[in-house]
Amino acid sequence: MGVKYFFTRFAGYNNIDVDAANARGIMVAYVPSYSPFAVAELAMTLGLDLTRHIFAASSMTQSGDFRITPEYFSKEIDQLTVGIIGVGHIGSAEAKLYHDLGARVLGYQRHKNENSNVTFVTLEELLMQSDIVSLHVPYEPGVNDLMIGATELGRMKSNAVLVNTARGELVDTVAVNGALADQAIAGFGTDVLPAETGVSGKHFDRLEQVADKNLLELMKNYPNVIVTPHVGFNTEPAMKDMIKTSFANFHEALTTGKTINQLK
C-alpha cells in the first residue's frame, strides 16, 4: 500500500513484526526511552496504595463501612523492603524514589550495573525478602513469557504485593488469581494486561463484558487488586520526550535515509 515508515512513540515494540516490515522495505523505529519517572511514579503509587490498603479502605467507605479492620494495618516506608526486577532506566528511577523515602531497595538484573540505591541479589532472594515486588523488564516473546508464575509467587511473603507496569505477558494472571485466593500474596497492581488489545481504549457497559476471564475474576473478587488502563507513560514530561524523539526519527529518516532508533 506504499507504506514506507512504521514508527512507534513507545519503548516497547513486541507488538510489531519487525522482520516482516523490513522484508517489505518498511522502516521501523521506536522511542527507546522517555521520562523514566512517569512509569516509576505510577509503580511506586500502586505499591504504596496496596501496602497501605488505600483502595480497599476507600471501597469500603464508599459503601458506607467506616470501620477500621485488622486488614488495614501496615508498615511505614522506612520499614519496607522493595524488590525491583529490571534495574534499567525506569527501575533505577523507582529505586531512587523508594531509597530517598527511606526504604531498603533490592534489585535483580541479568547484567548488573552500578546503582548506589540498590543492593543486587538473586531473583529468589528478592522474591523472598521483598514487601513490594515491582517489575520493569522488557517483554521478549519466547524468552521471558510468564516469568512471574506460581513458583515465583510461592516464594513471595504472604504480606507482600506484586506490581507490574512493564508488560502483561510477563505475569501469569491465573497464578495470581490462585495466590490471592490462597492469601499467598497480599495484593496485585497492574497497569498492563496480557490481552490488552481486547480492552485498550474501549468502554464497556458492564465489567462482565470483558472477555479475559482471568482479568474479570481479579477485578470482581479482590479489593486488593488495582488495574489501571496502561497510563504509566501519560505524563507531560514523558509525552514531550516521545514527541521530540519521534520527530527526530522522522527528520533523520527523511533527510538521511536512516535513524539511530531504527529497528532491524
Image (spheres, rainbow, N blue to C red):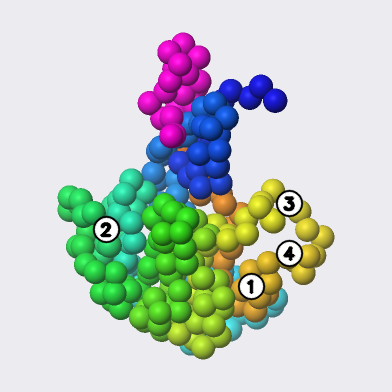
Q: Give the Cα distance between marks 3 and 2.
A: 36 Å
* Residue 23 pos. (x, y %): 53, 32
Q: Mark 2 points at which residue?
A: 110
Q: Name the residue under label 3.
A: 202
What segment is highlighted magenta in the picture?
Answer: 242-264
Q: Earlier in the sequence, mark 4 or mark 3?
A: 3
Q: Give the Cα distance between marks 4 and 2.
A: 36 Å
- Please state which of residues 103 and 196 is positioned toward the viewer in this rendering: 196
Q: Can residue 68 be seen in this view?
A: no
In the rendered image, the residue lying farthest to the top is: 255
Q: What residue type is labelled 4?
A: Val
- Please state which of residues 163 and 22 is positioned toward the viewer in this rendering: 22
Q: Which of marks 4 and 2 is in front?
A: 2
Q: Name the residue under label 4.
A: 210
* Residue 103 drawn in magenta: no
Q: Give the Cα distance between marks 1 and 3.
A: 18 Å
Q: Mark 1 points at which residue?
A: 214
Q: Give the Cα distance between marks 4 and 3.
A: 10 Å
Quadrant of the frame with the N terminus: top right
Q: Earlier in the sequence, mark 4 or mark 2?
A: 2
Q: Which of marks 3 and 2 is in front?
A: 2
Q: Earlier in the sequence, mark 3 or mark 2?
A: 2
Q: Nearer the viewer, mark 1 or mark 2?
A: 2
Q: What residue type is labelled 1?
A: Asn
